[in-house]
């Protein structure tokens, strides 16, 4: 190629040089022809002209001059042409390489390479940069797609396991199996197990496997892991996830319940919720579990922990409720007084709510009417108004200013209050609520308080403002009323009805009495609990109560099992702030036992009358038959007298001392009259032996000895006069009669005791 270029250049130079020489020669010949034929100059004259005039000599040399000039010009032209040609070919080759590189990129071959042709190859460098940018964009796009895929996978998984946790919480073992089996499948693992902490017995605190799943099959295992043992115990104690990729072959047999194969990696995630661990999820897989899957399992573990926590709380609550229900006893109450207390409590609460609204709405405008103080961030008091000093029992500002707020806080409240103050000092949310302070005299001062941060222009806390109103009297009344309401709920039946008769709220005693589940009671009305024969009477009573008239009496009602019960109730209407009837409160006491005894007494009385009439009408001639008939009548009279006496003493209620104890001599009931008689409180003797009331072991009376001796037969149905000793040592003469009740193999005795120094039979 180089040879061809040189040859072309020589040809051009030769052609131009010859052409220049020919043009110069033709010019000289043209002048000579003019001289010869037009001017008629002879050859000798031309020679003389050339000899005498140097111009002609120069003219004669013109072919050589033109040839030399053509040579120089053609040489320069050839060099320029050759340089231009080389440059064009270089650009053409470079563009071809760029074109092929761009074509490869267009076809998706991002890995294609291109070598920059020099520092002036700006286009090539730009396309190379474009290729690198495309590579980066494709890599980032791939990374983004993978991240989106992972996020979608995590979101779908959380939704799936959230649905499992919402729909299956009755059976813990089935719930944990569904969780671990679905989790193993979802993350493409091979084995999994779920362990739950068993901590009801502090002396035997351990970890129990509740579900195990491996190789697409359910594994039934009753594995127990001791507290702090193995990887599972470590994860619970440290409350951190453990991820092991180098698993020893003996791992499964030592610390895991995952099956017979050794996994390639093991993931142990504690079930932690609110900084409390409830168990562990253990996952085994042959392939290494990716980080986002580990984070997903941790999120699922947190949801599982929350559900297990709620299940435990519900179980414990149900257990406590059952225990409370078994221990509850019926106590006599003053219904009308309690109703008034409830109305007063409601009025107090409404008044407190109205005052709270006023304080929030008009704090700035009535600041001078409130207790006010200002503190530094460290709790140092820098200002206190007169009300602050007066309420806290100080005489002047110098007594409190410069002192720390801790001097006004009870020692028992300092732990939570210090946390509250740290939050305020850091610019946290303001505090608003009940606050108890300690006065200079050591008394409690209850206030409705507000602690608010006062900020500088840059947002930092300058000081903390305290505003409050004295609610000590209202707080004491509120606590008293709340205690009365709780006592009322524990001792009596309480139901809130809408004016239409629909059940609004009810306590546990009403639920136990009616034998309905709570959700069924909420769909009932008071008219659903009475027999049709009593419906019209109840409607008349209800209409009067709904108009604001209170009613008190006994209602016959029917339980879910269609049993008749009798309840002594007090119905009272409660009005709202517009003086409209908002609801009707029913306070009641179960009198079914007394009513049934009354009915039984009537039946026995009627039976006695019939037997007497039959005896009067019967005439027996034989003396033996007459004697036998008299003995039978006499025995029946004795039995009737016993029933009448027992019924009479039972119906006397709280007027006489009544003590109930079981066959082991343990006191179950001890009424108010008994407390006054023995001068001892019932909570001291309930659950204690009868020897607490008769401490002297040398009683000569067989009746008392039979009561104290759990193995001897009790003297039932006979009235005895005995002497007892009060707590002060005073001898008291009483009459006592003992009754027995047998129910499903259990025997209870009731002693009816009358102080004969007060009232004689």
Image (tube, rainbow, N blue to C red):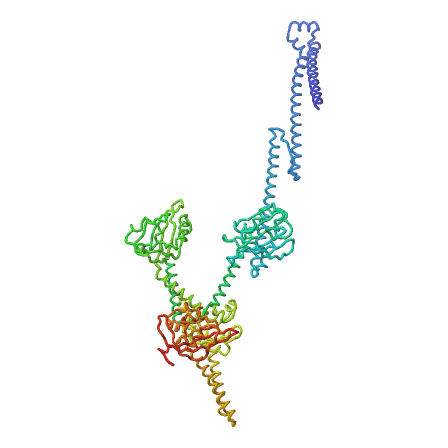
One can see residue 586 in this view: no
Give the residue furthest to the bottom: 621
- Residue at coordinates 50% horizontally, 69% vertically from top-left? 521
Q: Quadrant of the N terminus?
A: top right
- Is 614 rendered above or below residue 245? below
Query: With 193 as the anchor, is 31 left or right in this view?
Result: right
Q: Quick check: 93 above or below 495?
A: above
Residue 640 position, x and y percent, is: 46, 83
User: Looking at this view, is 393 or 618 the one in front?
Assistant: 618
Position of 385 with respect to 603 (left or right) is left
Left or right, 380 with respect to 127, comes to: left
Q: Position of residue 332 (x, y in %)?
A: 42, 72
Farthest left residue in view: 395
- Front in this rendered view, residue 458 or 594: 594
- The spot of residue 131 in percent (x, y) is 62, 37
The image quadrant where one finds the C terminus is: bottom left
Instruction: Residue 369: give x, y in percent of width and height.
Output: 32, 56
Residue 488 seen from this side: yes
């Amino acid at each position: 190629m180089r040879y061809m270029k040189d040859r072309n250049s020589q040809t051009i130079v030769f052609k131009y040089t010859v052409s220049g020489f020919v043009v110069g020669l033709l010019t000289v010949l043209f002048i000579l022809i003019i001289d010869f034929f037009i001017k008629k100059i002879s050859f000798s004259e031309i020679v003389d002209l050339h000899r005498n005039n140097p111009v002609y000599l120069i003219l004669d040399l013109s072919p050589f001059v033109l040839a030399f000039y053509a040579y120089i010009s053609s040489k320069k032209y050839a060099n320029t042409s050759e340089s231009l040609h080389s440059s064009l070919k270089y650009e053409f080759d470079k563009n071809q390489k760029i074109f092929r590189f761009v074509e490869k990129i267009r076809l998706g071959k991002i890995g294609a390479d291109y070598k920059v042709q020099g520092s002036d190859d700006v286009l090539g460098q730009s396309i190379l940069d474009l290729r690198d940018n495309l590579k980066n964009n494709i890599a980032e796009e791939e990374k983004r797609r993978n991240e989106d895929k992972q996020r979608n996978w995590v979101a779908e998984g959380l939704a799936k396991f959230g649905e499992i946790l919402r729909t299956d919480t009755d059976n813990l073992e089935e719930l944990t199996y569904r969780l671990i089996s679905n989790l193993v499948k979802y993350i493409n693992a091979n084995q999994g197990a779920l362990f739950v902490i068993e901590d009801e017995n502090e002396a035997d605190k351990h970890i129990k496997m509740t579900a195990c799943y491996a190789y697409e099959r359910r594994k039934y295992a009753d594995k127990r892991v001791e507290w702090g043992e193995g990887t599972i115990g470590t994860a619970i104690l440290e409350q951190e996830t453990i991820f092991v990729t180098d698993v020893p072959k003996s791992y499964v047999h030592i610390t895991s319940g995952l099956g017979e194969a050794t996994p390639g990696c093991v993931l142990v995630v504690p079930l932690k919720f609110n900084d409390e661990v409830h168990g562990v999820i253990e996952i085994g897989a042959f392939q290494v579990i990716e980080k986002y899957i580990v984070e997903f399992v941790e999120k699922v573990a947190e949801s599982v922990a929350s559900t297990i926590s709620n299940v435990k709380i519900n179980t414990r609550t149900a257990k406590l409720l059952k225990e409370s229900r078994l221990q509850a006893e019926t106590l006599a109450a003053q219904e009308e007084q309690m109703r008034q207390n409830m109305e007063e409590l409601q009025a107090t609460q409404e008044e407190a709510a109205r005052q709270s609204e006023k304080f929030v709405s008009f704090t700035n405008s009535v600041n001078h009417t409130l207790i006010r103080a200002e503190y530094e961030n460290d709790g140092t008091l820098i200002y206190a108004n007169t009300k602050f000093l007066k309420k806290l029992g100080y005489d002047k500002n110098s007594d409190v200013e410069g002192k720390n707020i801790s001097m006004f806080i009870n020692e028992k409240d300092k732990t939570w209050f210090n946390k509250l103050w740290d939050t305020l000092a850091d610019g946290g949310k303001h505090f608003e609520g009940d606050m108890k302070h300690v006065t200079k005299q050591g008394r409690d001062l209850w206030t409705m308080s507000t602690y608010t941060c006062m900020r500088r222009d840059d947002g930092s806390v300058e000081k903390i403002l305290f505003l409050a109103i004295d609610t000590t009297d209202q707080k004491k009344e509120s606590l008293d009323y709340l205690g009365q309401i709780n006592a009322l709920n524990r001792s009596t039946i309480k139901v809130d009805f809408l004016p239409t008769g629909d059940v609004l709220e009810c306590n546990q005693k009403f639920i136990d009495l009616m034998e309905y589940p709570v959700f069924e009671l909420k769909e009932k009305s008071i008219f659903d609990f009475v027999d049709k024969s009593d419906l019209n009477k109840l409607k008349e009573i209800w209409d009067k109560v709904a108009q604001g008239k209170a009613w008190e009496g006994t209602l016959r009602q029917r339980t879910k099992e269609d049993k008749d019960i009798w309840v002594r109730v007090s119905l009272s209407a409660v009005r709202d702030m517009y003086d409209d009837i908002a609801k009707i409160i029913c306070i009641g006491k179960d009198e079914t036992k007394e009513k049934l005894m009354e009915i039984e007494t009537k039946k026995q009385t009627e039976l006695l009358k019939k037997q007497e009439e039959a005896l009067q009408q019967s005439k027996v001639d034989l003396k033996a038959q007459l004697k036998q008939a008299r003995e039978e009548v006499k025995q029946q009279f004795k039995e009737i007298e016993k029933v009448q006496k027992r019924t009479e003493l039972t119906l006397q209620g709280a007027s006489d001392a009544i003590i109930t104890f079981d066959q082991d001599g343990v006191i179950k009931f001890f009424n108010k009259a008994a407390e006054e008689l023995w001068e001892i409180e019932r909570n001291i003797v309930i659950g204690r032996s009868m020897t607490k009331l008769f401490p002297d072991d040398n009683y000569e009376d067989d009746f008392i000895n039979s009561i104290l001796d759990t193995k001897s037969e009790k003297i039932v149905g006979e009235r005895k006069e005995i002497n007892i000793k009060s707590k002060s040592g005073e001898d008291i003469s009483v009459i006592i009669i003992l009754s027995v009740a047998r129910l499903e193999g259990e025997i209870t005795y009731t002693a009816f005791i009358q102080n004969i120094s007060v009232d004689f039979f």
